[in-house]
Amino acid sequence: MVPTLSSRLTRNSQTEGVFTTSSESESVGVMTKMACVLEPPLRMSVLSEVSASSRHYVDRLFDPDPQKVLQGVIDMKNAVIGNNKQKANLIVLGAVPRLLYLLQQETSSIELKTECAVVLGSLSMGTENNVKSLLDCHVIPALLQGLLSSDLRFIEACLRCLRTIFTSPVTPVELLYTDASVIPHLMLLLGRSLYAQEYICQIFAHCCKAPDHQTILFNHGVVQNIAHLLTSVSYKVRMQALRCFSVLAFDNPQVSMTLVNVLVDAELLPQIFVKMLQRDKPIEMQLTAAKCLTYMCRAGSIRTDDNCIVLKTLPCLVRMCNKERLLEERVEGAETLAYLIEPDVELQRIASITDHLIPMLADYFKYPSSVSAITDIKRLDHDLKHAHELRQAAFKLYASLGANDEDIRKKVSLGEGRPPVLSASRQGVTST
């Protein structure tokens, strides 16, 4: 007689040390409560749908035949791809603890471990609640342990899942720094493959949120270990490495002074950043490279009158403010430009006469537009979400432009590029 799923979970918790987490119990409770408020036929259909469509996937994870378990995990992988409902159902039914158990078992084949890591990665790509459930099951320590394997495919699967979890807004970035041995091991894995480089750099870039994080990464040689990745054959690797440098250099003179002297293929790092500002490069690369140079300049490692700032970085950031750019790019461009020119009057003067920047900023207040409200609901929703960010970025740039020069302030308050709030106030003064 084949034991039921509930008996298997009970047996598993007693003999294998795998328990249902509190979050899973809560999820089951919530689901039951939701079903209980429905009419009886609907209630039965909700519960039976979860059982019928998902339960057999979890059942197969407990089969005594290892090959059937492997095939069950592969089938589960195919079932959850692009299906958030199925992901949620499997989490509620307790798939995560069993997958983690199989992933950590020494008797599990490397193929089974890899497929378990892939499924966990797919589950983490669902909703934020999915990520919370994975965190409650202590998925990060298990995946970090998997990085000690010698099998590259398994390592990449673990890294891919870790990347997805660490880049989720619900994951505390401090979890990366809890074990002092993690960062050095990740540095060692940078040489394994292009995928490893991409995922590790993305983890570093996202989890570097504070000066302490910058110091830890810097002291473990992150600058030297990822500098050569800026010339990688993979665009994704180059971009993630570039993002690493932007967060490392932000408001950090120690890192910035180091970066300015780093050589990559006989070229200084700032020269590589300047090449990435060229118009034929992808916009995200231009913006991120401009951030790197901006942060290095603000940290004092590059002079404000250096050609790479005056002739390259500043014009690039002004281009990002153009109305032809995406709203997100215009926000990022204006805020970075405001930060660059804030303390330097000469940069403020140059920016004020570059590519009609001041009139260009008036467009930041034209969202959402009446046309989008009529013809395109999706665009209206997008504009509404970014309208506040656009105005905030514009005011930051106005403040930086007029911080020291009265002529620029007059240009802003009297010229065609004045923000609507100033126009309204002037009309009020005139009418009185």
Image (cartoon, helix red, strand yellow):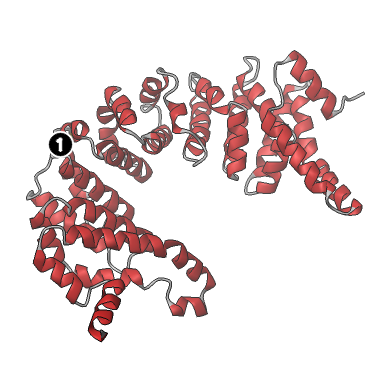
Residue 393 image-quadrant placement: bottom left
Position of residue 138 measured from the top left corner of the image (x, y, whole percent): 58, 26
- Position of the C terminus by quadrant: bottom left
Name which quarter of the figure residue 325 lies in.
bottom left
Horizontally, is 408 left or right of 188 in the view? left
Q: Secondary structure at mark 1?
A: loop
Q: Is residue 119 visible?
A: no
Residue at 21% x, 32% y: name it.
255
Residues 193 and 186: in front is: 186
| Quadrant holding the N terminus | top right
| Amino acid tagged 1 | Val
Front residue of this view, candidates 29 and 78: 29
- In the image, residue 263 lies at what x, y percent? 16, 33
Q: Residues within 10 Å of mark 1 (few under 14, many from 20)?
A: some
In the image, farthest residue toward the right: 1
Residue at x-position 53% and y-position 32%: 157
Q: Is residue 256 visible?
A: yes
Location of mark 1 (residue)? 260
